[in-house]
Amino acid sequence: MNRTRQVYFRLLLLLCVAFLCILGMSVKVHAYGIEQTDVQKTGIPIKWTKPQNYEVVKYIVHAGEDYHSTKQIATLDANATSYTVPAEAGSRKYIKVEYVWQGYSKQYTSTLGSINNGVTLPTKVTKVNQKRWWRFALHSDVGWKRVESATGYKLTFRNSKNKVVKTETIKYNPKEPGATLTKVRNNMIYTVVVQAYTTVNGKTYWGQPSDKAYLFTSPEVKSSRIKGGKLQVTWAPVSGATGYDIYVSASAKKGYKKVKAIKGGSKRSTTIKKFKKKKFKSGKKYYVYVVTRKKVGGRTYTSGSEYYWRVGQKPMQWL
């Protein structure tokens, strides 16, 4: 009989411990259903489903750049099922919502759920630029400043006649983004406009398009020679240009001076009378390159130069 009582006592004790564990232990219950509901310029609206079988006391909202940097930003009452997280335009946030619930003898905190990539409306894309023009490969590399909230970017390329030559969509990259326009013509100016977008719940939201960026290279020098103490230079004009600058040096890799500015994109030749206030000498080595100019409104864009020509010789060389 005593043995039977001991067995019953042990069973009763185990049931009591189990009951107390159910009521008293802090259980991390994940009640999924938290999501971003819209895309705003400076806010991330979220909503969630109220946990079942728990007496919710309040909700606590955390946000940060990533999981490790989250901080508490709001405390909401037990009836709340939505909140708009303040955030800068064009930003991306990690958002976590916790709920405090009433246990048997005290309150406990559990995680309701999280959003890894809460986003605001993408900002206008800036710093669109030509990274490099590849004369022999016939393509132009383009870059721009990353927009954190972007899912991707749409690029529209046009030629100097304003005809669309390519549209492309680039997906988000945590590194500095970029793209390439292929099959370019070395005597043509192109433009590119970049627009960021983000996609939430199957809907796409667009940011403001970037300003136009101009893509072009320096013209090819077709001939250069010294005659009568003067330097005569001809080049292949660039469609869409508004002018050219002529640079000369007595050294192949350095010391280049702008000796003349040419107005008019259709111009293709000029004569330079002097270099450093002296006439050109036959038999002396000189080097030359031409820079393309494109003036738009009050701003002038230039090609720079990656090549030079030795006067009197045809092949181009890398600067």
Image: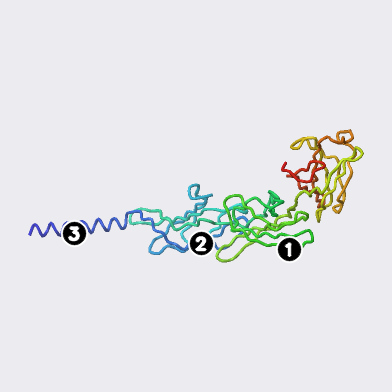
Judging by the rendered image, the residue that carries numbered circle 2 is 35
- At which x and y percent is residue 6? 13, 56
| Location of mark 3 (residue) | 11
Q: Picture quarter containing residue 118?
A: bottom right
Real-space Cα distance between discs 1 and 3?
81 Å
Q: Is residue 8 left or right of residue 199?
A: left
Type of amino acid under label 2: Glu
Front of the two marks 1 and 3: 1
Q: Residues within 10 Å of mark 2 (few under 14, many from 20)?
A: some
Give the amino acid type for the residue marked by disc 3 in the picture: Leu
Residue at the disc numbered 1 = 164
Front in this rendered view, residue 33 or 159: 159
User: For this rendering, which residue is in front, 242 or 54?
Assistant: 242
The residue located at (14%, 58%) in the rendering is: 7
Q: Under tag 1, what secondary structure?
A: strand
Horizontal relation, residue 257 to residue 211: left or right: right
Of the pair 249 and 180, the residue shown nearer to us: 249
Dot placed on the residue nearer the N-terminal end, 3 or 2: 3
Please tell me which of labels 1 and 3 falls first in the chain: 3
Q: Secondary structure beneath disc 2?
A: strand
